[in-house]
Protein backbone atom coordinates (compact mmCIF):
# COMPACT_ATOMS: atom_id res chain seq x y z
CA UNK A 1 0.00 0.00 0.00
CA UNK A 2 2.86 2.41 0.89
CA UNK A 3 4.66 1.73 -2.42
CA UNK A 4 1.44 2.22 -4.38
CA UNK A 5 0.67 5.49 -2.60
CA UNK A 6 4.20 6.77 -3.22
CA UNK A 7 3.99 5.91 -6.91
CA UNK A 8 0.66 7.73 -7.21
CA UNK A 9 2.11 10.80 -5.46
CA UNK A 10 5.05 10.86 -7.85
CA UNK A 11 2.71 10.73 -10.84
CA UNK A 12 0.75 13.70 -9.49
CA UNK A 13 3.93 15.70 -8.71
CA UNK A 14 5.33 15.12 -12.20
CA UNK A 15 2.07 16.17 -13.83
CA UNK A 16 1.22 12.67 -15.04
CA UNK A 17 -2.02 10.86 -14.35
CA UNK A 18 -2.36 7.21 -13.38
CA UNK A 19 -3.91 5.37 -16.32
CA UNK A 20 -7.64 4.75 -16.13
CA UNK A 21 -9.26 1.38 -16.68
CA UNK A 22 -11.84 2.77 -19.11
CA UNK A 23 -12.25 6.00 -21.05
CA UNK A 24 -15.59 6.83 -22.67
CA UNK A 25 -14.90 9.50 -25.24
CA UNK A 26 -16.05 11.28 -28.41
CA UNK A 27 -19.47 12.01 -26.92
CA UNK A 28 -21.72 14.73 -25.61
CA UNK A 29 -21.89 14.23 -21.85
CA UNK A 30 -24.66 15.70 -19.68
CA UNK A 31 -23.58 15.39 -16.07
CA UNK A 32 -26.57 16.61 -13.95
CA UNK A 33 -23.84 18.48 -12.06
CA UNK A 34 -24.50 22.23 -12.08
CA UNK A 35 -20.82 23.17 -11.70
CA UNK A 36 -19.90 21.26 -14.88
CA UNK A 37 -23.09 20.54 -16.83
CA UNK A 38 -21.47 19.13 -19.99
CA UNK A 39 -18.29 17.37 -21.07
CA UNK A 40 -16.84 15.25 -23.88
CA UNK A 41 -15.26 12.32 -22.08
CA UNK A 42 -15.24 10.39 -18.82
CA UNK A 43 -12.45 8.25 -17.35
CA UNK A 44 -13.15 5.40 -14.95
CA UNK A 45 -11.07 3.34 -12.51
CA UNK A 46 -12.39 0.77 -10.05
CA UNK A 47 -15.94 1.46 -11.15
CA UNK A 48 -15.66 5.12 -10.11
CA UNK A 49 -15.33 8.28 -12.17
CA UNK A 50 -11.80 9.74 -12.03
CA UNK A 51 -12.12 12.40 -14.75
CA UNK A 52 -14.84 14.40 -16.48
CA UNK A 53 -13.87 16.89 -19.17
CA UNK A 54 -12.63 17.32 -22.70
CA UNK A 55 -11.65 14.48 -24.98
CA UNK A 56 -8.16 15.95 -25.31
CA UNK A 57 -7.60 16.06 -21.55
CA UNK A 58 -8.95 12.52 -21.17
CA UNK A 59 -6.00 11.25 -23.21
CA UNK A 60 -3.77 11.95 -20.19
CA UNK A 61 -5.56 9.06 -18.46
CA UNK A 62 -4.85 6.59 -21.25
CA UNK A 63 -2.32 3.83 -20.68
CA UNK A 64 -1.38 0.57 -22.43
CA UNK A 65 -4.17 -1.40 -20.74
CA UNK A 66 -6.88 1.30 -20.81
CA UNK A 67 -10.07 0.30 -22.59
CA UNK A 68 -11.00 3.25 -24.80
CA UNK A 69 -14.66 3.27 -25.82
CA UNK A 70 -15.21 5.58 -28.81
CA UNK A 71 -18.89 6.54 -28.63
CA UNK A 72 -18.92 8.09 -32.12
CA UNK A 73 -20.99 11.08 -31.13
CA UNK A 74 -23.50 9.34 -28.87
CA UNK A 75 -24.93 11.17 -25.87
CA UNK A 76 -24.01 10.19 -22.30
CA UNK A 77 -26.21 10.79 -19.25
CA UNK A 78 -25.90 9.78 -15.61
CA UNK A 79 -27.38 6.32 -15.24
CA UNK A 80 -31.16 6.60 -15.34
CA UNK A 81 -32.89 5.55 -12.13
CA UNK A 82 -36.49 4.33 -12.07
CA UNK A 83 -37.63 5.55 -8.66
CA UNK A 84 -40.75 3.39 -8.58
CA UNK A 85 -41.31 0.07 -10.34
CA UNK A 86 -41.93 -3.58 -9.53
CA UNK A 87 -39.02 -5.71 -10.70
CA UNK A 88 -40.63 -9.13 -10.47
CA UNK A 89 -43.82 -7.80 -12.06
CA UNK A 90 -41.86 -6.49 -15.04
CA UNK A 91 -40.42 -9.93 -15.71
CA UNK A 92 -43.72 -11.63 -15.05
CA UNK A 93 -45.42 -9.39 -17.60
CA UNK A 94 -42.85 -10.39 -20.21
CA UNK A 95 -43.50 -14.07 -19.61
CA UNK A 96 -47.24 -14.25 -18.96
CA UNK A 97 -50.39 -13.40 -20.93
CA UNK A 98 -49.75 -9.71 -21.59
CA UNK A 99 -52.96 -7.84 -22.33
CA UNK A 100 -51.44 -4.40 -22.88
CA UNK A 101 -52.91 -2.58 -25.84
CA UNK A 102 -56.23 -4.45 -25.92
CA UNK A 103 -58.49 -1.87 -27.58
CA UNK A 104 -61.87 -3.45 -26.87
CA UNK A 105 -63.63 -6.18 -24.94
CA UNK A 106 -63.71 -8.18 -28.18
CA UNK A 107 -59.94 -7.96 -28.58
CA UNK A 108 -59.46 -8.89 -24.92
CA UNK A 109 -61.65 -11.94 -25.49
CA UNK A 110 -59.74 -12.92 -28.62
CA UNK A 111 -56.35 -12.72 -26.91
CA UNK A 112 -57.51 -14.61 -23.85
CA UNK A 113 -59.25 -17.29 -25.93
CA UNK A 114 -55.96 -18.07 -27.69
CA UNK A 115 -54.49 -18.97 -24.30
CA UNK A 116 -57.64 -20.79 -23.14
CA UNK A 117 -57.57 -22.98 -26.26
CA UNK A 118 -54.06 -24.17 -25.32
CA UNK A 119 -54.85 -24.73 -21.64
CA UNK A 120 -55.38 -28.13 -20.01
CA UNK A 121 -58.82 -28.88 -18.53
CA UNK A 122 -59.18 -27.00 -15.26
CA UNK A 123 -55.92 -25.07 -15.76
CA UNK A 124 -55.97 -21.42 -14.63
CA UNK A 125 -55.55 -18.72 -17.28
CA UNK A 126 -53.96 -15.64 -15.74
CA UNK A 127 -53.11 -12.34 -17.45
CA UNK A 128 -52.46 -8.68 -16.81
CA UNK A 129 -52.39 -5.33 -18.58
CA UNK A 130 -55.92 -4.53 -19.80
CA UNK A 131 -57.30 -1.05 -19.33
CA UNK A 132 -60.69 0.12 -20.48
CA UNK A 133 -59.71 3.74 -21.16
CA UNK A 134 -59.98 3.54 -24.97
CA UNK A 135 -62.79 1.01 -25.18
CA UNK A 136 -66.21 1.86 -26.64
CA UNK A 137 -68.17 1.83 -24.47
CA UNK A 138 -65.72 2.61 -21.67
CA UNK A 139 -66.61 -0.09 -19.16
CA UNK A 140 -65.00 -2.76 -17.05
CA UNK A 141 -65.10 -6.30 -18.45
CA UNK A 142 -67.42 -8.76 -16.71
CA UNK A 143 -67.49 -12.42 -15.81
CA UNK A 144 -70.02 -12.92 -18.60
CA UNK A 145 -67.47 -11.58 -21.11
CA UNK A 146 -65.00 -14.20 -19.91
CA UNK A 147 -67.56 -17.00 -19.55
CA UNK A 148 -68.28 -16.66 -23.28
CA UNK A 149 -64.71 -17.74 -24.12
CA UNK A 150 -63.89 -19.87 -21.06
CA UNK A 151 -66.90 -21.52 -19.44
CA UNK A 152 -64.80 -24.18 -17.71
CA UNK A 153 -61.23 -22.97 -17.15
CA UNK A 154 -60.91 -20.42 -14.34
CA UNK A 155 -59.70 -17.03 -15.64
CA UNK A 156 -58.30 -14.07 -13.68
CA UNK A 157 -57.12 -10.95 -15.52
CA UNK A 158 -55.55 -8.07 -13.62
CA UNK A 159 -56.05 -4.48 -14.69
CA UNK A 160 -52.86 -2.66 -15.75
CA UNK A 161 -52.64 -0.77 -12.44
CA UNK A 162 -52.67 -4.02 -10.42
CA UNK A 163 -55.47 -2.70 -8.21
CA UNK A 164 -58.35 -4.63 -9.77
CA UNK A 165 -58.98 -7.90 -11.56
CA UNK A 166 -61.85 -9.49 -13.44
CA UNK A 167 -62.62 -13.17 -12.93
CA UNK A 168 -64.94 -15.51 -14.76
CA UNK A 169 -67.68 -17.57 -13.09
CA UNK A 170 -65.44 -20.65 -12.80
CA UNK A 171 -62.85 -18.66 -10.85
CA UNK A 172 -65.48 -17.00 -8.64
CA UNK A 173 -66.99 -20.43 -7.87
CA UNK A 174 -63.61 -21.83 -6.81
CA UNK A 175 -63.14 -18.77 -4.59
CA UNK A 176 -66.64 -19.07 -3.11
CA UNK A 177 -67.59 -15.54 -4.17
CA UNK A 178 -71.36 -15.13 -4.37
CA UNK A 179 -73.90 -12.33 -4.00
CA UNK A 180 -73.72 -12.88 -0.24
CA UNK A 181 -69.93 -12.44 -0.02
CA UNK A 182 -68.90 -9.32 1.86
CA UNK A 183 -65.82 -7.42 0.64
CA UNK A 184 -62.76 -7.49 2.88
CA UNK A 185 -61.50 -4.32 4.53
CA UNK A 186 -59.74 -2.21 1.90
CA UNK A 187 -61.46 -3.93 -1.00
CA UNK A 188 -64.67 -4.07 -2.97
CA UNK A 189 -66.72 -6.60 -4.93
CA UNK A 190 -68.59 -4.88 -7.75
CA UNK A 191 -72.16 -6.10 -8.26
CA UNK A 192 -74.78 -5.59 -10.95
CA UNK A 193 -78.30 -4.23 -10.58
CA UNK A 194 -79.51 -7.64 -9.37
CA UNK A 195 -76.86 -7.82 -6.67
CA UNK A 196 -74.78 -10.46 -8.47
CA UNK A 197 -70.96 -10.15 -8.66
CA UNK A 198 -69.86 -8.69 -11.99
CA UNK A 199 -66.50 -10.43 -11.72
CA UNK A 200 -64.63 -7.19 -10.86
CA UNK A 201 -62.68 -7.35 -7.59
CA UNK A 202 -61.00 -4.18 -6.33
CA UNK A 203 -57.79 -3.96 -4.24
CA UNK A 204 -57.96 -6.24 -1.17
CA UNK A 205 -60.83 -8.21 -2.75
CA UNK A 206 -58.44 -9.43 -5.46
CA UNK A 207 -57.09 -11.85 -2.89
CA UNK A 208 -60.41 -13.70 -2.74
CA UNK A 209 -59.55 -15.19 -6.14
CA UNK A 210 -55.79 -14.66 -6.07
CA UNK A 211 -55.21 -17.08 -3.21
CA UNK A 212 -56.70 -19.91 -5.30
CA UNK A 213 -54.34 -19.41 -8.25
CA UNK A 214 -51.65 -22.13 -8.08
CA UNK A 215 -48.46 -20.87 -6.49
CA UNK A 216 -45.48 -20.23 -8.72
CA UNK A 217 -42.35 -22.30 -8.37
CA UNK A 218 -39.19 -20.77 -6.94
CA UNK A 219 -37.56 -21.23 -10.32
CA UNK A 220 -40.26 -19.16 -12.03
CA UNK A 221 -40.01 -16.44 -9.37
CA UNK A 222 -36.28 -16.21 -9.94
CA UNK A 223 -36.83 -16.08 -13.68
CA UNK A 224 -39.23 -13.16 -13.32
CA UNK A 225 -36.55 -11.16 -11.52
CA UNK A 226 -33.81 -12.03 -14.02
CA UNK A 227 -35.98 -11.26 -17.06
CA UNK A 228 -37.19 -7.99 -15.52
CA UNK A 229 -33.66 -6.87 -14.66
CA UNK A 230 -32.37 -7.76 -18.15
CA UNK A 231 -35.16 -5.78 -19.77
CA UNK A 232 -34.39 -2.76 -17.61
CA UNK A 233 -30.69 -2.75 -18.41
CA UNK A 234 -31.45 -2.99 -22.14
CA UNK A 235 -33.77 0.01 -21.87
CA UNK A 236 -30.98 2.07 -20.29
CA UNK A 237 -31.90 1.98 -16.61
CA UNK A 238 -29.04 1.45 -14.17
CA UNK A 239 -31.05 1.28 -10.94
CA UNK A 240 -34.61 0.40 -9.97
CA UNK A 241 -36.36 1.32 -6.73
CA UNK A 242 -38.35 -1.88 -6.20
CA UNK A 243 -41.58 -0.74 -4.55
CA UNK A 244 -42.72 -3.47 -2.19
CA UNK A 245 -41.90 -7.03 -1.29
CA UNK A 246 -41.17 -9.43 1.52
CA UNK A 247 -38.18 -11.00 3.24
CA UNK A 248 -38.33 -14.07 0.92
CA UNK A 249 -38.24 -11.66 -2.06
CA UNK A 250 -35.10 -10.11 -0.59
CA UNK A 251 -33.49 -13.49 -0.03
CA UNK A 252 -34.19 -14.35 -3.66
CA UNK A 253 -32.57 -11.10 -4.84
CA UNK A 254 -29.47 -11.75 -2.74
CA UNK A 255 -29.13 -15.22 -4.23
CA UNK A 256 -29.38 -13.87 -7.78
CA UNK A 257 -26.79 -11.17 -7.10
CA UNK A 258 -24.51 -13.76 -5.53
CA UNK A 259 -24.82 -15.90 -8.65
CA UNK A 260 -24.14 -12.93 -10.93
CA UNK A 261 -27.50 -13.25 -12.70
CA UNK A 262 -28.54 -9.64 -12.03
CA UNK A 263 -26.41 -6.58 -12.87
CA UNK A 264 -29.07 -3.89 -12.35
CA UNK A 265 -28.82 -1.94 -9.10
CA UNK A 266 -31.87 -2.45 -6.85
CA UNK A 267 -33.08 -0.25 -4.00
CA UNK A 268 -35.43 -2.70 -2.29
CA UNK A 269 -38.55 -1.93 -0.27
CA UNK A 270 -40.47 -4.23 2.08
CA UNK A 271 -44.23 -4.04 2.58
CA UNK A 272 -45.55 -3.00 5.95
CA UNK A 273 -46.97 -3.29 8.50
CA UNK A 274 -45.79 -6.91 8.29
CA UNK A 275 -43.35 -9.39 9.76
CA UNK A 276 -40.86 -8.41 7.06
CA UNK A 277 -41.13 -4.76 8.10
CA UNK A 278 -40.70 -5.74 11.75
CA UNK A 279 -37.54 -7.63 10.83
CA UNK A 280 -36.11 -4.60 9.03
CA UNK A 281 -36.89 -2.39 12.03
CA UNK A 282 -35.17 -4.89 14.32
CA UNK A 283 -32.07 -5.41 12.17
CA UNK A 284 -31.66 -1.97 10.59
CA UNK A 285 -30.78 -1.06 7.03
CA UNK A 286 -28.53 -3.11 4.73
CA UNK A 287 -26.65 -0.66 2.52
CA UNK A 288 -24.58 -1.17 -0.66
CA UNK A 289 -24.41 -4.94 -0.69
CA UNK A 290 -22.79 -6.62 -3.71
CA UNK A 291 -20.53 -3.75 -4.67
CA UNK A 292 -23.22 -1.12 -4.26
CA UNK A 293 -25.90 -3.02 -6.17
CA UNK A 294 -28.41 -3.77 -3.38
CA UNK A 295 -29.74 -1.65 -0.53
CA UNK A 296 -32.63 -2.38 1.84
CA UNK A 297 -33.71 0.48 4.08
CA UNK A 298 -37.36 1.23 3.25
CA UNK A 299 -40.85 0.11 4.28
CA UNK A 300 -43.75 0.65 1.91
CA UNK A 301 -47.30 1.22 3.10
CA UNK A 302 -50.35 1.37 0.85
CA UNK A 303 -52.85 4.08 1.77
CA UNK A 304 -55.39 3.62 -1.03
CA UNK A 305 -56.13 2.07 -4.41
CA UNK A 306 -55.86 3.42 -7.96
CA UNK A 307 -57.78 6.15 -9.74
CA UNK A 308 -58.76 4.07 -12.77
CA UNK A 309 -60.52 1.42 -10.67
CA UNK A 310 -62.00 4.14 -8.38
CA UNK A 311 -60.01 2.88 -5.41
CA UNK A 312 -58.02 6.10 -4.90
CA UNK A 313 -59.26 7.71 -1.68
CA UNK A 314 -60.81 11.13 -2.35
CA UNK A 315 -61.94 13.99 -0.13
CA UNK A 316 -65.14 14.30 -2.17
CA UNK A 317 -67.02 11.61 -4.14
CA UNK A 318 -66.02 10.53 -7.63
CA UNK A 319 -67.56 12.82 -10.21
CA UNK A 320 -68.62 9.81 -12.32
CA UNK A 321 -69.77 7.69 -9.35
CA UNK A 322 -71.18 10.02 -6.65
CA UNK A 323 -71.64 7.26 -4.09
CA UNK A 324 -67.98 6.27 -4.06
CA UNK A 325 -65.03 7.89 -2.24
CA UNK A 326 -62.42 5.18 -2.82
CA UNK A 327 -60.73 2.87 -0.32
CA UNK A 328 -58.51 3.18 2.72
CA UNK A 329 -56.29 0.12 2.38
CA UNK A 330 -54.21 0.13 5.57
CA UNK A 331 -54.91 -0.36 9.27
CA UNK A 332 -54.06 2.94 10.96
CA UNK A 333 -53.93 1.33 14.41
CA UNK A 334 -51.06 -0.90 13.23
CA UNK A 335 -49.48 1.79 11.08
CA UNK A 336 -48.94 4.53 13.67
CA UNK A 337 -46.59 2.61 16.01
CA UNK A 338 -44.66 1.27 13.02
CA UNK A 339 -44.09 4.80 11.72
CA UNK A 340 -42.79 5.96 15.09
CA UNK A 341 -40.38 3.03 15.34
CA UNK A 342 -39.17 3.64 11.77
CA UNK A 343 -38.43 7.27 12.61
CA UNK A 344 -36.43 6.19 15.68
CA UNK A 345 -34.54 3.47 13.80
CA UNK A 346 -33.66 5.49 10.70
CA UNK A 347 -35.75 3.31 8.42
CA UNK A 348 -37.26 5.16 5.47
CA UNK A 349 -41.00 4.95 4.86
CA UNK A 350 -42.71 5.38 1.51
CA UNK A 351 -46.48 5.49 1.09
CA UNK A 352 -48.55 4.65 -1.94
CA UNK A 353 -51.03 7.57 -1.98
CA UNK A 354 -52.98 8.53 -5.09
CA UNK A 355 -56.17 10.31 -4.01
CA UNK A 356 -56.23 13.73 -2.35
CA UNK A 357 -57.61 12.24 0.87
CA UNK A 358 -54.90 9.53 0.98
CA UNK A 359 -52.19 12.12 0.35
CA UNK A 360 -53.51 14.38 3.11
CA UNK A 361 -53.80 11.45 5.50
CA UNK A 362 -50.19 10.41 4.91
CA UNK A 363 -48.94 13.97 5.39
CA UNK A 364 -50.92 14.15 8.63
CA UNK A 365 -49.34 10.89 9.80
CA UNK A 366 -45.84 12.17 9.01
CA UNK A 367 -46.61 15.35 10.93
CA UNK A 368 -47.89 13.32 13.89
CA UNK A 369 -44.81 11.10 13.83
CA UNK A 370 -42.39 14.02 13.76
CA UNK A 371 -44.21 15.52 16.74
CA UNK A 372 -44.21 12.21 18.64
CA UNK A 373 -40.52 11.41 18.02
CA UNK A 374 -38.27 14.35 18.95
CA UNK A 375 -35.12 15.00 16.91
CA UNK A 376 -32.95 13.66 19.75
CA UNK A 377 -34.57 10.23 19.33
CA UNK A 378 -34.27 10.04 15.54
CA UNK A 379 -31.48 7.96 14.03
CA UNK A 380 -31.09 10.23 10.99
CA UNK A 381 -30.90 14.01 10.70
CA UNK A 382 -33.03 13.76 7.54
CA UNK A 383 -35.74 11.11 7.40
CA UNK A 384 -36.43 11.57 3.64
CA UNK A 385 -39.75 9.75 3.76
CA UNK A 386 -41.47 9.45 0.41
CA UNK A 387 -44.94 9.75 -1.07
CA UNK A 388 -45.26 7.32 -3.96
CA UNK A 389 -47.44 8.67 -6.79
CA UNK A 390 -48.68 11.95 -5.21
CA UNK A 391 -51.11 12.02 -8.11
CA UNK A 392 -54.15 13.94 -6.85
CA UNK A 393 -53.14 16.46 -4.18
CA UNK A 394 -55.25 19.26 -2.81
CA UNK A 395 -53.31 22.46 -3.70
CA UNK A 396 -53.30 23.43 -0.02
CA UNK A 397 -51.29 20.28 0.75
CA UNK A 398 -48.53 20.73 -1.85
CA UNK A 399 -46.44 23.11 0.34
CA UNK A 400 -46.58 20.57 3.19
CA UNK A 401 -44.32 18.14 1.29
CA UNK A 402 -41.28 20.40 1.58
CA UNK A 403 -42.22 21.54 5.10
CA UNK A 404 -42.47 17.95 6.35
CA UNK A 405 -39.49 16.67 4.36
CA UNK A 406 -41.62 14.31 2.26
CA UNK A 407 -40.26 13.52 -1.22
CA UNK A 408 -42.86 13.32 -4.01
CA UNK A 409 -42.06 10.16 -5.98
CA UNK A 410 -44.08 10.64 -9.18
CA UNK A 411 -44.45 8.78 -12.47
CA UNK A 412 -44.81 11.11 -15.50
CA UNK A 413 -46.40 8.42 -17.68
CA UNK A 414 -49.35 8.19 -15.28
CA UNK A 415 -50.40 11.68 -16.34
CA UNK A 416 -50.44 10.89 -20.05
CA UNK A 417 -52.17 7.58 -19.41
CA UNK A 418 -54.76 8.99 -17.00
CA UNK A 419 -55.41 11.89 -19.37
CA UNK A 420 -58.37 10.02 -20.82
CA UNK A 421 -60.27 9.16 -17.65
CA UNK A 422 -59.04 11.48 -14.87
CA UNK A 423 -61.29 14.39 -15.96
CA UNK A 424 -64.40 12.21 -15.70
CA UNK A 425 -63.29 10.66 -12.39
CA UNK A 426 -62.40 14.01 -10.78
CA UNK A 427 -64.07 16.87 -12.63
CA UNK A 428 -62.14 19.93 -13.72
CA UNK A 429 -61.62 21.57 -10.30
CA UNK A 430 -59.61 18.75 -8.74
CA UNK A 431 -57.28 18.57 -11.75
CA UNK A 432 -55.61 21.79 -10.50
CA UNK A 433 -53.62 19.67 -8.04
CA UNK A 434 -53.28 16.60 -10.26
CA UNK A 435 -49.85 15.52 -11.51
CA UNK A 436 -48.61 18.97 -10.44
CA UNK A 437 -44.91 18.42 -11.14
CA UNK A 438 -43.95 22.04 -11.68
CA UNK A 439 -45.72 23.22 -8.52
CA UNK A 440 -43.82 20.63 -6.49
CA UNK A 441 -40.45 21.69 -7.93
CA UNK A 442 -41.22 25.40 -7.58
CA UNK A 443 -42.01 24.86 -3.91
CA UNK A 444 -38.64 23.32 -3.16
CA UNK A 445 -39.20 19.61 -3.78
CA UNK A 446 -37.01 17.17 -5.67
CA UNK A 447 -39.25 14.82 -7.64
CA UNK A 448 -38.04 11.22 -7.80
CA UNK A 449 -39.44 10.15 -11.15
CA UNK A 450 -40.25 6.59 -12.12
CA UNK A 451 -42.49 4.48 -14.29
CA UNK A 452 -44.51 2.17 -12.00
CA UNK A 453 -43.89 -0.65 -14.48
CA UNK A 454 -45.56 -3.04 -15.13
CA UNK A 455 -48.48 -0.65 -14.65
CA UNK A 456 -46.83 1.45 -17.39
CA UNK A 457 -44.35 0.31 -20.02
CA UNK A 458 -41.23 1.15 -18.04
CA UNK A 459 -39.39 2.94 -20.87
CA UNK A 460 -37.21 5.87 -19.74
CA UNK A 461 -37.88 7.80 -22.96
CA UNK A 462 -41.62 7.70 -22.33
CA UNK A 463 -41.07 9.05 -18.81
CA UNK A 464 -38.76 11.84 -20.00
CA UNK A 465 -41.12 12.76 -22.85
CA UNK A 466 -44.18 12.77 -20.59
CA UNK A 467 -42.43 15.03 -18.08
CA UNK A 468 -41.42 17.67 -20.63
CA UNK A 469 -44.34 17.42 -23.09
CA UNK A 470 -47.25 16.52 -20.80
CA UNK A 471 -48.92 14.98 -23.85
CA UNK A 472 -49.76 11.42 -24.78
CA UNK A 473 -47.52 9.60 -27.22
CA UNK A 474 -49.60 10.83 -30.19
CA UNK A 475 -49.18 14.47 -29.14
CA UNK A 476 -52.69 14.84 -27.69
CA UNK A 477 -53.06 16.92 -24.53
CA UNK A 478 -56.61 18.22 -24.24
CA UNK A 479 -57.84 21.65 -23.18
CA UNK A 480 -55.29 23.73 -21.19
CA UNK A 481 -57.79 24.44 -18.43
CA UNK A 482 -58.23 20.69 -17.99
CA UNK A 483 -54.70 19.28 -18.37
CA UNK A 484 -52.57 22.25 -17.29
CA UNK A 485 -49.61 22.27 -19.70
CA UNK A 486 -47.86 24.73 -17.35
CA UNK A 487 -47.13 21.77 -15.05
CA UNK A 488 -44.58 20.31 -17.50
CA UNK A 489 -40.93 20.22 -16.40
CA UNK A 490 -37.97 21.71 -18.21
CA UNK A 491 -35.61 19.20 -19.78
CA UNK A 492 -32.99 19.98 -17.14
CA UNK A 493 -35.53 19.29 -14.38
CA UNK A 494 -36.73 16.11 -16.09
CA UNK A 495 -33.15 14.84 -16.37
CA UNK A 496 -32.53 15.40 -12.66
CA UNK A 497 -35.87 13.75 -11.87
CA UNK A 498 -34.51 10.58 -13.53
CA UNK A 499 -30.97 10.80 -12.13
CA UNK A 500 -29.88 13.00 -9.24
CA UNK A 501 -33.21 13.40 -7.46
CA UNK A 502 -33.97 9.64 -7.22
CA UNK A 503 -30.43 9.20 -5.89
CA UNK A 504 -31.25 11.76 -3.19
CA UNK A 505 -34.50 9.90 -2.44
CA UNK A 506 -32.34 6.81 -1.79
CA UNK A 507 -29.74 8.66 0.37
CA UNK A 508 -27.25 8.07 -2.46
CA UNK A 509 -26.68 11.50 -3.98
CA UNK A 510 -23.01 11.38 -2.94
CA UNK A 511 -22.54 8.06 -4.73
CA UNK A 512 -24.57 8.31 -7.95
CA UNK A 513 -27.10 10.44 -9.83
CA UNK A 514 -24.59 12.70 -11.57
CA UNK A 515 -21.32 12.26 -13.44
CA UNK A 516 -18.72 13.60 -10.99
CA UNK A 517 -15.28 12.49 -9.88
CA UNK A 518 -15.61 9.98 -7.06
CA UNK A 519 -19.10 8.73 -7.94
CA UNK A 520 -20.02 5.34 -9.36
CA UNK A 521 -19.58 5.20 -13.12
CA UNK A 522 -23.18 4.53 -14.11
CA UNK A 523 -24.09 5.89 -17.56
CA UNK A 524 -27.07 5.75 -19.88
CA UNK A 525 -25.86 6.33 -23.45
CA UNK A 526 -28.39 7.27 -26.12
CA UNK A 527 -28.34 7.71 -29.89
CA UNK A 528 -29.87 11.22 -29.81
CA UNK A 529 -29.63 14.37 -27.70
CA UNK A 530 -32.91 14.41 -25.80
CA UNK A 531 -31.97 17.79 -24.30
CA UNK A 532 -32.28 19.42 -27.75
CA UNK A 533 -34.28 17.36 -30.24
CA UNK A 534 -38.00 18.04 -30.90
CA UNK A 535 -40.35 16.53 -28.32
CA UNK A 536 -41.80 13.87 -30.62
CA UNK A 537 -38.31 12.57 -31.49
CA UNK A 538 -37.61 11.78 -27.83
CA UNK A 539 -39.88 8.74 -28.17
CA UNK A 540 -37.74 7.45 -31.07
CA UNK A 541 -34.49 7.67 -29.11
CA UNK A 542 -32.85 4.36 -28.29
CA UNK A 543 -30.22 3.12 -25.85
CA UNK A 544 -26.76 2.60 -27.35
CA UNK A 545 -25.13 1.37 -24.17
CA UNK A 546 -25.79 0.91 -20.46
CA UNK A 547 -22.78 1.17 -18.15
CA UNK A 548 -22.86 0.08 -14.50
CA UNK A 549 -19.77 0.34 -12.28
CA UNK A 550 -17.77 1.39 -15.32
CA UNK A 551 -18.48 -1.87 -17.14
CA UNK A 552 -20.71 -2.22 -20.19
CA UNK A 553 -23.82 -4.05 -19.00
CA UNK A 554 -25.59 -3.70 -22.35
CA UNK A 555 -24.47 -2.72 -25.84
CA UNK A 556 -27.01 -2.34 -28.65
CA UNK A 557 -26.45 -4.63 -31.66
Image: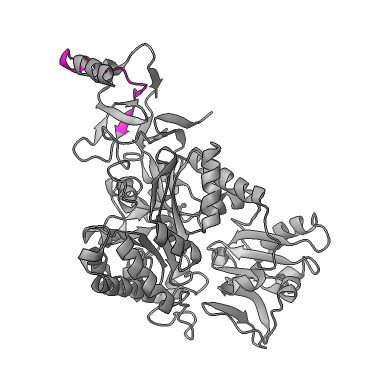
Q: Is residue 343 left or right of residue 101?
A: left
Q: Position of residue 39 (x, y in %)?
A: 26, 29
493 or 249, nearer to the observer: 249
Give whichever of 413, 549 is nearer the camera.
Answer: 549
In this view, 550 is above or below 318? above
Q: Looking at the figure, which quarter contains the N terminus?
A: top left
Quarter of the rendering occupied by the C terminus = top right
**Residue 533: which quarter of the image?**
top left
Residue at 54% across / 54% down in the picture? 249
The location of residue 388, given as percent across then percent down, is: 39, 62
Q: In the displayed orientation, state which residue is furthest to the right.
A: 121
Residue 194 position (above or below residue 405): below
Q: Is residue 22 magenta?
A: yes
**Residue visible at 43% across and 57% down in the picture:** 476
Q: Position of residue 49 (x, y in %)?
A: 31, 30
Magenta span of residues: 12-29
Please check the rendered image and state whether residue 434 is part of the magenta-colored stretch, yes or no. Answer: no
Among the 4 quarters of the image, the one containing residue 203: bottom right
Q: Residue at x 43, y 82 (%)?
A: 317
The scheme the figure's colours follow is one colour
- Residue 20: give x, y in percent of width and height: 33, 20
Q: Is 358 on the left-hand or right-hand side of 113?
A: left
Res. 47 in view: yes
Amino acid sequence: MRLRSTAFALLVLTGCQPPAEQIYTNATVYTSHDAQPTAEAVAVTGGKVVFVGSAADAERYQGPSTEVVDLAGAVVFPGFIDAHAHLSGVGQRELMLNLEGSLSVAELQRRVKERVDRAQPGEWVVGRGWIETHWTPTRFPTRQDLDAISPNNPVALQRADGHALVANSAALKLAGVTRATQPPSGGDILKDARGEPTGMLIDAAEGLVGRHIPAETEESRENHVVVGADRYVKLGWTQLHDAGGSWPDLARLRKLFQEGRVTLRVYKTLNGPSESADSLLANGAFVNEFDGRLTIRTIKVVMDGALGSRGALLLAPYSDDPGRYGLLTTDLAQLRPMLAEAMRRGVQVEAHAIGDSANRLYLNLVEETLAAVPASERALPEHRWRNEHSQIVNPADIPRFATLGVIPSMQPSHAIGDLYFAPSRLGTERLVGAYAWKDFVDQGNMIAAGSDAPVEQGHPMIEFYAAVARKDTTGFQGAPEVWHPEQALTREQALKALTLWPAYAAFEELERGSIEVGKWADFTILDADIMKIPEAEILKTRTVMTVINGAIAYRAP
